[in-house]
Amino acid sequence: MNTQPELGNVLVSGGAGYIGSHVAHALKGAGYAPVVIDSLVRGNLWAVAGSFRKGDVGDADFVRAVCNEFRPVAALHFAAFIEVGESVQKPEAYFTNNRDKAKIFFDVLAEKGVRHVVFSSTAAVYGEAAETPILETQPTRPINPYGQSKLKAETYLRTVADVNSVALRYFNVAGAQPKAGLGEAHFPETHLIPRLVLPLIGTRAEVLEALGLKKGFTVFGTDYPTCDGTAVRDYIHVADLADAHLRALRYLREGGGTNIFNLGSGSGFSVSEIVAAARRVLDRSDFAPGTEPRRAGDPAVLIADSRKAQQVLGWRPQRGIEQMIGSAAAWHRSRTYTETILAKSART
Ligand SMILES: NC(=O)c1ccc[n+]([C@@H]2O[C@H](COP(=O)([O-])OP(=O)(O)OC[C@H]3O[C@@H](n4cnc5c(N)ncnc54)[C@H](O)[C@@H]3O)[C@@H](O)[C@H]2O)c1
């Protein structure tokens, strides 16, 4: 069995992906020993912090073997498919990976005596929220298989006997930690900030082409009932999200009960405001994006009410939108990012 630092081994499923890798890095910094398990179906080996075992969370024997080897004190479950559009095309793949395999994973954790589990949930579980800012008590009515599959896993986890769990419902996650060599390298990339930043920073044409960004960034919808007609979202820096995971873990380890927390900044930015921030941060006052009609299913405004996370976990995001854009730009300029996207594109 591997040696444990003072705070113990923590299983991080999906720790080779964007958010899981930042959290594993933070765990290490805080004195835990992360044990990443990832099938690498979407992840990157360079992103792994701590011990690594390659495998699928739906493979009960694999998860049992890792638990026997490392005797984790807790688990953080990030492993999932994350693309809303793809989930509409391939719902079964999403229900299998995000719901069915999560259930297998949670059952093995319970069997192996892992009593504390933090689950990566999403604002997508709310669907078209009746009111915004969104409280944890609002009804969950996800409108796509991604949100539905995540909600099923979240709900199941709450029923697992002898396990206390925290579901963290993230809103829009952005930014990077370029000094740690970590950032978002999704392929395809559907998130606003990378799609906005990449064409503005001299990214190689092959990378832009692979990501469908050859014609640059376009704004979807300019006739929403918002301050400037573009959709409003709530963004949090991935490093602030990592901090929330450490706090959720501490909360459970100190005896906190099963709970749900929204994670957002509590204030929204419209797409036009994000574009204006990118112009400032990247010194691109010349930039004027194209526009297209609204995309189906995109609500006008999605903002988190995160007061519960502030009150119970003492969590408050520290980094603003300019830091998200600036750190993303530094990361997207890196050779690791470019080579990763070119390699992923060559495999498709
Ligand atoms: N990125 C966001 O903005 C966002 C917002 C809300 C919620 N989330 C949630 O956060 C989590 C992480 O998102 P991300 O952006 O880091 O995604 P990601 O695709 O970068 O990382 C997911 C990781 O899980 C791995 N994986 C997937 N299925 C697996 C399986 N069956 N077994 C083992 N490994 C598997 C992939 O290889 C990848 O490394 C997801 O659960 C997602 O639903 C993400």
Image (spheres, rainbow, N blue to C red):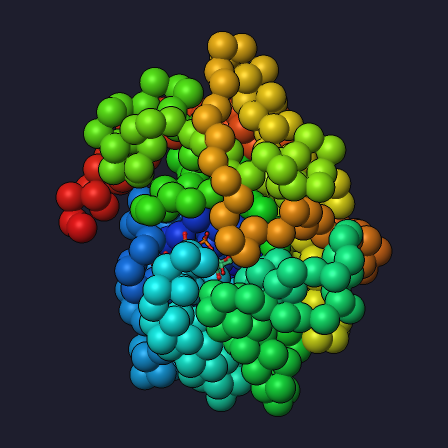
Front residue of 21/284: it is: 284
- Name the residue rendered at 47%, 81% in the picture: 103
Measured as percent of width and height from the top left, residue 64 is found at 38, 81
Q: Nearer the viewer, residue 54 or 1?
A: 54
* Residue 83 can be seen in this image: yes
* View quadrant of ligand 1: bottom left
Q: Quadrant of residue 122?
A: bottom right
Seen from the viewer's position, the closer of residues 17 and 30 is 17
Residue 300 x, y percent position in the rendering: 65, 47
Image position of 24 (left or right of 324): left
Residue 168 in sight in this render: no
> Which residue is rendered at x = 51% and y = 33% of the image?
219
In the image, is 321 to the left or to the right of 92? right
Give the tally of numbered discs: 0
- Looking at the image, the residue that sits furthest to the right is 311
Determine the residue positioned at 56% across, 25% down: 275
| Above/below status of 35 relative to 277 | below
Q: Tell me which corner region of the image, top left, top right, bottom left or bottom right, holds residue 151.
A: bottom right
Which residue lies at the image location 56% right of the left edge and 51% below the top edge?
A: 298
Quarter of the rendering occupied by the N terminus: bottom left
Image location (x, y in percent) of residue 3? 43, 63
**Splitting the image into 4 quarters, where does residue 52 fall?**
bottom left
Residue 154 x, y percent position in the rendering: 58, 74
Is 124 on the left or on the right of 72, as rendered?
A: right
